[in-house]
Image: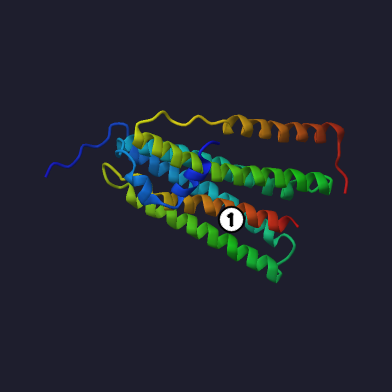
Amino acid sequence: MTTPARDPGLQPERTRLAWRRTTLTCTVVTLLAGRQALHGGAGPAALIAVALTLLAWLVFLRAAHLRVAGTATAEPAPLSPRLALTAAACTVALAVFAAAMLF
Amino acid sequence: MSGFPRGLRLWFAPRELREEGDTPDYRFSLANERTFLAWLRTALALIGGGFAVDQFLPGLVRGVRTGLSVALLAAGVLCALRAVNHWVRCERAMRRGEDLPASRFPAFLSLAVALVAVTMVVVVLFGWEGR
């Protein structure tokens, strides 16, 4: 019945906040991407670009949400490589859409 | 980056990573995770910068603008991939009780950012704006 003591360094909280900051940054980049896509009018290509960007953002959001929920315990398990890879893949996807929209 | 192919395999094989050595103190893993997230934010900031150069500098010559934008985006992609790789390598080193891997990437990234900044200074000073 002994619950593990709270970490005095608040490591899980700091990690959750780091995920929130990263999600916020991702949101800003997504908004910039949407602005870029719709700059030349809302043609079919632009709408597809916006949809793909939104998809990348949602996948990132889900990964962050899973991890934030996973660190709610006193001694959370390490981050799974799959989540790390998912977050990085969404970042790369945003860059690739950006490069595609430049031309 | 020595051992890159081995590290690459670990990206996709979480079980293999978990079988190596002992699970470190959870606080070390969380610190490693926050470092990974900080690198990911750096990558996102570079990508955002790539968007911003293209969107908010319409006066720049098209070639310079596109070049800067692509350079920033490429740096962002590299940074994101390196973030995962470094995170995996640190996690593995901690599990095995080895030293944390050294990396030249921060030096390369700061040189690249300095190069972009110098380019911008040159553009501003010599006024390469135009259509």
Residue B41 against residue A93 in the figure, above or below: above
Chain bearing tag 1 is: A
Q: Identify the element where label 1 is drawn.
A: helix
- Residue B85 lies, in percent from the top left, at 50, 42
Instruction: Work out which residue is located at the far bottom of the displayed protein and give it.
Output: A44
Q: Nearer the viewer, residue B5 or B34?
A: B5
Residue type of the residue flagged with mark 1: Ala
Q: Residue at x 57, y 50 (%)?
A: A28
Q: Residue B90, position in %: x, y?
A: 43, 36
Going by the image, does A87 lie left or right of A94? left
Report the residue at 37% width, 34% height from top: B94
Residue neighbourhood size for the residue with mark 1, other residues' Cα within 10 Å, grouped as few (<14), some (14–19), many (≥20)? some
For the image, the number of numbered tags is 1
Tell me the quarter of the image containing the N terminus of chain A.
top left
Q: Residue A51: horizontal and vertical position, in percent? A: 59, 65
Vertical order, A36 against B67 (above or below): below
Left or right placement of residue B101 versus residue B44 in this view: left
Q: Is residue B22 visible?
A: yes
Q: Which residue is mark 1?
A: A93
| Quarter that holds the C terminus of chain A | bottom right
The part of the image, by quadrant, that contains residue B112 is: top right
In-front residue for pair A71/B52: A71
Residue at the outermost left position: A1
> On the picture, is A18 further left or further right than A27?
left
Residue at the (66%, 45%) spot, across then down: B74
* Residue B12 location (% of width, % of height): 45, 52
